[in-house]
Structures are given as C-alpha cells and as structure tokens.
Amino acid sequence: MKLSINHIYDSLTVTCYCIVITNNLNIMNTTKNKIAVLVLTIILIATGLYWFSSTSNTSPIKVKIGVVTDLSGPAAYWGESTLAGIDILKKELASRGITNVEFIVEDYSLDSAKAASVTQKIINIDKVRGVYAEFSPGASSAGAILKGKNLPAIFDSAIISPIANNDNAFKAYLDYKQGCKQVAERFKNDGVEKIGFLKVSLEFGQLCEDGISEVYGNNMISEGYNLGSTDFRTQIMKIKKFGATALINVGFEGDTANTLKVLRELNYKVPYGTIEDTMSDEIVKLYREELQGAYVFGFEKINSDFLMKLKAYNVSSPYGAALAYTHLKQLVEAIIRNPENVSRQVESIRNSPSDNTIGFAGFKDRIAEMKMNIKKY
C-alpha cells in the first residue's frame, strides 16, 4: 500500500488525537483506565489505517477514456491494431490492481462527420474524462468539438491544427514534413532530378509537400486526390509526362497499393517513397519489383517485449498498438493521479517520461517527439 502525503498527514492527526485522549485520561491512574485508553487508541489507529488503505490503491471514480478510431474504413487495419494496444494496457492495469478504467471505443470509418458525431456522444452521453482520437479526419473533427471543453486529449495524427487553440490537447505520431523531406533528400542523393508527389487533400498532404519542396523546389510536380480515391492513373500519367524519376505518396495503405498498381500497369519504373505504416506484408509481397529502391520514413523499432505480447493478436501493423498503449497509458495515469484537476492532468501528460515502446522521447510544445527511421527497400 502506498500512502500519499495527505494520508500520512491524516495518520499523524489520528495519532495526535489519541495522544491527547491518553494525556487527559492519565489523571485517572487506575489499571482499568489505562487498559481502556490503550484499546481506544488501537481502535482509532486501525480505523484510520483502514480508511486510507481503502482510498490509496485506485482512484474512487470511474475513469472513462474515449477512443475515436477507424474499424471499418480505409484505416481499419490500424484501428484493429489500436484495439490490441488497448487490450494489452487493460491487462497491465489489472495486474497493478487498477480496475476502474473503461475504454469506450467508437468507429468513425475515417468519415469526418461521423467522427464529430461519436465525439459528441462520448463527451455528452458517456461522460469520458479524456479522449484519444486517431487519423487526420478524426483529429480535425474531435479537435473542433473539444475546444473549450475541459478535457485532456491526445491526437494520434499527422496534423497539428487540432492542438492550436486547445491547451489541453497533445499531438502524437510522426512529423510528416521532416519525414518527407528526408525521403526526398535520399532520392536527391541517388541522382533523382525531378520528383512527383501524389497529394492527398488533407493537412498532412500539405505538410509532406512542404518538406519535399524544400529539397526540390520547382523540380517537383504535385497532383492531388481526395481521400477514398482508388484510380490514380490520370495523376500518375501527368507526373510521368513531367519527367519525374521518383514518386512519393503518404496516404493510407490502400493508397500505396493503388499507386503501385498503376505504376505496374503503366510500366512506369520509378522508385517510390511513403510512410512505413502503409507497407503491409501483403503489399511488400505483391509489389516486390515496384518497391525496389523505395524509401520509407517510419518509427524506431518497437520494443521486443511489447512485440511478444502483440503476437497473440495477429494484427497487420504493430504501430497502432504501440502508439495506443503508450499514449493511453499517459492519459490514464494522469487522470488517476489527479482525478478532479484537469490542469494537473495536462501537466502530467506534458511531463510524460520517455518510453521505448515505440521511441517516444517526450512532448515538446505539446507535440510528441518520436525517433524516426529511414528505410530503403
């Protein structure tokens, strides 16, 4: 049993109270009175210890955490991984005797309107004490709703805007501008003079374009597409006509698959650049030839102990699990330590120590600093 400063203070108060009673009764100098005083003292101390032992193990409140993710849309593979991370965390919390935490998971199918709806639901109906939202559409919608709400939130997303006007919000995930810049630099060093970019119409698409532009300037052609698009033939033919000898696209797993499919169909043999979490084992196996010379930016290697726990879940990508485990643990511990004080919860998250589960190095200006790795195929 761990006693807080308040518990120790209360214990001393009980003890002092017993001493006062003892001193007052010492004037009655009979053996019978001494025994009565001793029994009274033991009862008071035992009662005090029972009281703070019953309040020190876990927070007396029900800690509900809302999770907004994709379980049925283009990023469902990641959402399923997130569920695995949540389950691993639940088992760890239970092993520590923490049983008053509930994760309320909502599927928004990567649809912004649905993300807004489920965020309203977990706040107003479920009365969650913290929110974890994944991907740019979810972070954008949930972020808009959470402004002005006195709740801590962590957005597992490439975009930064949801934390701009919300001091209680934090941004996790990788830095797309720096990642795309580093991939572009690798292509530049390999002799690629002109580069093409398939730009998804979301904030992280712009962040990536900014990074590539710093390396290539006017020697880059950017062709846009909307989330959910499956045919990139027109855009890639324009990129080919421009004379690009490398191509970058940092959408979701399906976007990488559709890009590589068109490259094969057009016999357009150029190296590809993307983010590593789009490269499932199935894609690597199916498009092995198209991926020769490809560069991807991604996370540092996941901790081996965590990967061993994850084996039982058979997920296609370990990253969602590792991120959910890391950041939901920060949310839970912050709320349990300060159940009624959001300012202290936010301060606790802000000061989260480094964690080697997936290379989390700490928060800077409420943005997670993640160790990044560049890999070549």
Image (cartoon, helix red, strand yellow):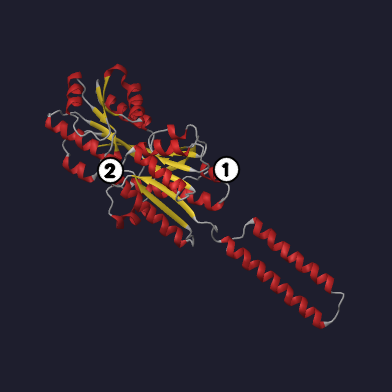
Q: 91 and 126: which one is in front?
A: 126
Q: What residue is drawn where x is 23% and y is 39%?
A: 254
Which quadrant of the rendered structure holds the C terminus?
top left
The amino acid type, in three-letter code, at marker 1 is Ser
Q: Secondary structure at mark 1?
A: helix
Residue drawn at 20 percent across, 19 percent down: 242
Is 223 located above or below residue 341 in the figure?
above
Task: Say left or right for 2 vs 140.
Answer: right
The outermost residue toward the right is 27
Percent of width and height locating residue 173 = 39, 39
Give percent across and percent down for residue 140: 40, 35
Q: Is residue 299 visible to the viewer in this orientation of the structure?
A: no
Q: Report the residue marked by disc 2.
A: 73
Residue drawn at the location 83% of the way across and 74% of the way down: 25
Sequence-earlier tag: 1 or 2: 2
* 1 vs 2, front mark: 2
Give amino acid for label 2: Gly
Element under label 2? loop
Residue position for label 1? 343
Asked whether the viewer can see residue 22, the reply is yes
| Left or right side of 253 for 369 | right
Q: Quarter-wise, where is residue 109 in the image?
A: top left
State the image coordinates of residue 30 (x, y, percent, origin top left).
Answer: 84, 81
Front in this rendered view, residue 174 or 165:
165
Question: Looking at the picture, how far across and down is residue 278, in whole percent?
Answer: 27, 39
Number of the label disc, if any, that sits on residue 217: none
Q: Is residue 148 left or right of residue 19?
A: left
